[in-house]
Amino acid sequence: MTVAIRWVSFVAVVAPVLLIGCGTDRTALAPADLPAITADKSGGVISSRDPSGQIATLSTTGSIDLTNPFFQNLGTNGRTCASCHLQSDGMGLSAAAAQAAFAASAGTDPLFAAVDGANCASVTPADGAAGHTLLLNNGLIRVGLTVPAGAEFTIAAVHDPYGCALQGSPAVASVYRRPLPTTNLRFLSAVMFDGRETLQPLNTGTTFMANLRADLAHQAMDATLGHAQAAVSPTTAQLNAIVDFELALFTAQRVDDSAGVLNAQGADGGPEDLVSAPYYPGINDPLGGNPTGAPFNPNAFTIYEPWKTLTSSNPSTAARQAVARGQVVFNTHPLTITGVAGLNDALGVPAIPGNCTTCHDTPNVGNHSLPVPLDIGTSHPAAFESDAQIAAALGQLSVPDFPIFQVTCTSGPLVGTVRYTSDPGRALITGKCADVGRIKGPILRGLASRAPFFHNGAAATISQVVAFYNLRFQMGLSAQETSDLITFLKSL
């Protein structure tokens, strides 16, 4: 018999919270003091409390089938896909959820399997929380990647705080990354931060969905064999069922504690409008990659356009106006892009005028609509950073104690170049020096539910994210613009 959880309708009610994942039953009620809410549009959703309101997920199937292989133990260590992908965290994993799981299970939850849920695979139960600090404090999973044969570089660990930065021959580098959400996947241009699961390209409309399904199935297989330590691969039927489940999910912030319901008064916040959001590879690309030939429109976000002119006496009006102002800042505030590998070097332009949507161009989604991994500096160790602008921006973050690698380019166009990084990024897949530190930007919807931020969890809060960008790209934000931009990002 199919076990299903029906979506809870947001019509003048406070929805119960469903927390899916981490191997335990974590069902809780929303806080009693959360006011009743009313939306212009209503539909079947599951909602959970998050730090700034409520995060909501809908499935185009109308329910979540808990017998789907996504929720099944297909490996040997007790993990499921849902161990790292919680509805309460926008189908991702927050550091707060990891801490709660550790406290509730005394560290025995499958999430903390030493294979990648510990600082190193050598961690034992006797090490306790000290062996899992990167997951507990920054929501990071260890990823062991083999340096490619014939790479254009050599790699050495110059700082190894956990004793497993580089191991074996050929060398396996330990890098630490945030789990990406398993929702809103039909907007992807690359699978995984370094694109290693994009085996079939996602840059052509005619092949996009078939290739996306193939890539996601391969990712599910690798995750089961790796993260869950399965002895055998899932069957084709199981992999297809996981992909079907994931592609049906859409997630976004639905309620803000100050602005209220985010699809009220004509706005299109929440997950409902994502289902029909237009998307194809290259849509609104700023570099001329739109296959229709349409020019780039910096006004990539229009969700809160109706709130720009609100004049009602609704108690939420001031907060909604702030969200709308923040959307304008995101779309149009000028910034200067310098020193970004994958962009400035690729174009041969030392300074590029732009705005946030130059890189976050997908309309009302926020990732890049073509695979353009970039190095904006979040993996640069401050102690080795020679660019004063990047160093100042890094000073706004809460960067964990990562291993630091010295990457020396020994062949290719960058021969002789030496770089320092906590994560060589796509270079560990391609072997190219030009790819050192380059990773993709994630989809922004549901952002507020899954702190910390950036691929390496270096920003503890959205405020730190904005502070980093403000200095990194010379935005010159005023206090009001900073506040409004933070408010907007929390509403996604």
Image (cartoon, helix red, strand yellow):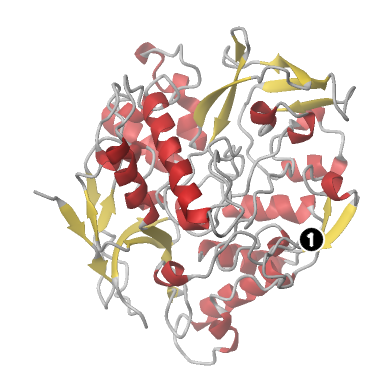
In depth, the one of 268 and 287 nearer the eye is 287
Total number of numbered labels?
1
Label 1: which secondary element: loop
In depth, the one of 407 and 491 nearer the eye is 407
Q: Residue at x 24, y 44 (%)?
A: 68
Residue most extreme to the front: 206
Locate residue 288 relative to residue 456 in the image: left or right. Answer: right
Residue 248 in sight: yes
In depth, the one of 283 and 455 nearer the eye is 283
Q: Residue at x 43, y 30 (%)?
A: 222
Three-letter code, disc 1: Met
Label 1 environment density (alpha carbons within 10 Å; few <14, some 14–19, many ≥20): some
In depth, the one of 315 and 229 nearer the eye is 229
Residue under pointer 1: 475
Dividing the picture into quadrants, the one containing residue 333 is bottom right
Dividing the picture into quadrants, the one containing residue 390 is top right
Q: Residue at x 84, y 18 (%)?
A: 410
Q: Position of residue 10 (x, y in %)?
A: 29, 72
Locate residue 43 relative to residue 189 in the image: left or right. Answer: left
Q: Position of residue 132 (x, y in %)?
A: 45, 24
Dividing the picture into quadrants, the one containing residue 93 is top left
Q: Is residue 308 above or below residue 288?
A: below
Q: Position of residue 450 (x, y in %)?
A: 47, 49
Q: Is residue 335 above or below residue 412?
A: below
Residue 480 in sight: no
Q: Position of residue 143 (x, y in %)?
A: 53, 26
Residue most extreme to the left: 1
